Image (tube, grey):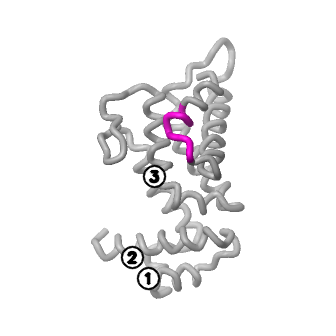
Amino acid sequence: MDRRQRKTRAAIFQAFTRLLENKTYTALTVQEIIDDADISRSTFYAHFETKDELLKAMCTDIFDHVFSDELLSEENHDFSQHSTFRDRITHILYHLHEKQQSIKGLFSGECGEVFLRYLKEYLYYVFDEHIIVKDDIPHDYAMDIAVAAFAETVRWWLKGHSDYTPEEISRFYFESVDI
């Protein structure tokens, strides 16, 4: 993707995010996104076939970076020397916290369910190697519980309790769910 395409895509994402702050996903139209992004209809459709594709692309952009396999030193945090599962979860929380303005609007109505579904898909990948099954509890059951609890923790945190730090949320999660 060239610079112009990246700039247009960013404008579409920003418009989508702004509009979701005041409208539900269902009520939001492609035309409103086009108007807010100040682009033509053909430009929008050159990037996304539907509003649903836009939502999926936005989630993918957020999660591809948030769930990167490498724990790097970044501007607001450095997890490059940490490798525990808890460190990885805290690192993910830092990224979600940094992107909370973009994400908050994604929690509205049915859009929130789609966002959480995508979030859970990424979480399954991260959690799979760290869930240790106790006794005769099925692995997929333990995964479902751990992932659902973390997704709901993220929802709770970003929908009104973002004054807690990523470290505090990580602690809340690990003390609540015996992983």
| Residue type, numbered disc 3 | Glu
| Residue that mark 1 sits on | 43
Q: Residue at x 28, y 71 (%)?
A: 2
Rendering coords of residue 21 (x, y %): 61, 68
- The disc, 2 or 3, on the residue closer to the chain's N-terminal end is 2
| Residue that mark 2 sits on | 8
Image vertical order of residue 34 relative to residue 20, above or below? below
Q: For mark 3, give the secondary structure.
A: helix
The N terminus: image quadrant? bottom left
Report if the CB atoms under discs 2 and 1 are less than 8 Å apart.
Answer: yes
Rendering coords of residue 17 (x, y %): 54, 68
The residues bearing labels 2 and 3 have C-alpha atoms spaced at a distance of: 22 Å
The foreground one among 39 and 156 is 156
In the image, is residue 53 part of the stretch drawn in magenta?
Answer: no
The residues bearing labels 1 and 3 have C-alpha atoms spaced at a distance of: 29 Å
| Residue that mark 3 sits on | 98
Labels 2, 1: front one: 2
Please identify the dominant SS of the magenta region: helix
Image vertical order of residue 132 relative to residue 39, above or below? above
Q: Which residues are magenta?
A: 163-170
| Residue type, numbered disc 2 | Thr
Location of residue 114 by image quarter = bottom right
